[in-house]
Image: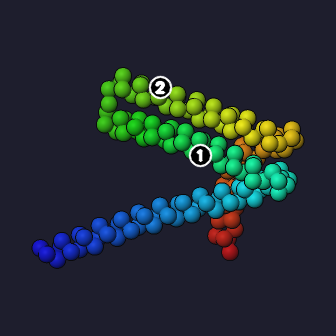
């Protein structure tokens, strides 16, 4: 019996270690993506040294607000998923769906606010490039990763 307790403790420790390691790796991936995003933005927008600091200070502030909205939306989606799994009442599910709609609108509004907050730091051409970049960055990144994986599999 003592042997099983020892194995259970070691297993719990390893699981917690793997969870924290996965969390750390996820944050490292996010950091790398954000670094790539910054480099691409500097290049695309042709930001000079004077404007880089101001731009990214405001950009970071707005990104944090957006991330908060994304988290709230994801939490609402998780609540709805759990309610579906638990066969919740129709009224509860309707309320959760309505809450998701509200969170989704808040996310769109935060995106627009981010764009407006950055507009004052950019000329019209840079602003237009920012809008295009923001909408295309993740799609292009995903495509590049898929292409890289396909290429690696063919070798």
Q: Quadrant of the N terminus?
A: bottom left
In the image, 117: left or right of 1? right
Q: 48 or 142, which is in the foreground?
A: 48
**SS for tag 1?**
helix
The label on residue 98 is 2
Residue in view at x 67 percent, y 34 percent: 113
Q: Quadrant of residue 112?
A: top right
Q: Quadrant of the C terminus?
A: bottom right
Residue most extreme to the top: 91
Residue in view at x 69 percent, y 45 percent: 58
Q: 58 or 125, which is in the foreground?
A: 58
User: In the image, which is nearer the foreground, mark 2 or mark 1?
Assistant: 1
Q: Decide which of tag 2 and tag 1 comes sooner along the chain.
A: 1
Residue 144 seen anywhere in this rendered image of the structure: no
Residue 21 seen anywhere in this rendered image of the structure: yes
Task: Locate residue 145, reporting x and y percent.
Answer: 66, 61
Q: Residues within 10 Å of mark 1 (few under 14, many from 20)?
A: few
Task: Locate residue 90, reporting x and y percent.
Answer: 36, 24
Residue in view at x 35 percent, y 35 percent: 83
Residue bearing mark 1: 64
Q: Gap in Å between the C-alphas at discs 2 and 1?
A: 24 Å
The label on residue 153 is none
């Amino acid at each position: 019996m003592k042997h099983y307790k020892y194995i259970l403790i070691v297993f719990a420790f390893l699981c917690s270690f793997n969870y924290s390691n996965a969390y750390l790796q996820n944050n490292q991936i996010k950091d790398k993506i954000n670094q790539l995003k910054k480099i691409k933005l500097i290049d695309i927008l042709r930001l000079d040294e004077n404007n880089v600091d101001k731009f990214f200070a405001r950009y970071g502030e707005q990104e944090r607000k957006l991330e908060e909205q994304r988290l709230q939306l994801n939490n609402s989606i998780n609540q709805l998923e759990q309610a579906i799994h638990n066969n919740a009442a129709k009224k509860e599910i309707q309320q959760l769906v309505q809450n998701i709609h509200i969170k989704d609108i808040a996310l769109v509004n935060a995106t627009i606010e981010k764009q407006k907050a950055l507009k004052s730091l950019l000329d019209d051409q840079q602003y237009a490039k920012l809008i295009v970049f923001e909408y295309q960055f993740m799609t292009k990144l995903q495509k590049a990763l898929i292409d890289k994986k396909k290429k690696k599999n063919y070798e």
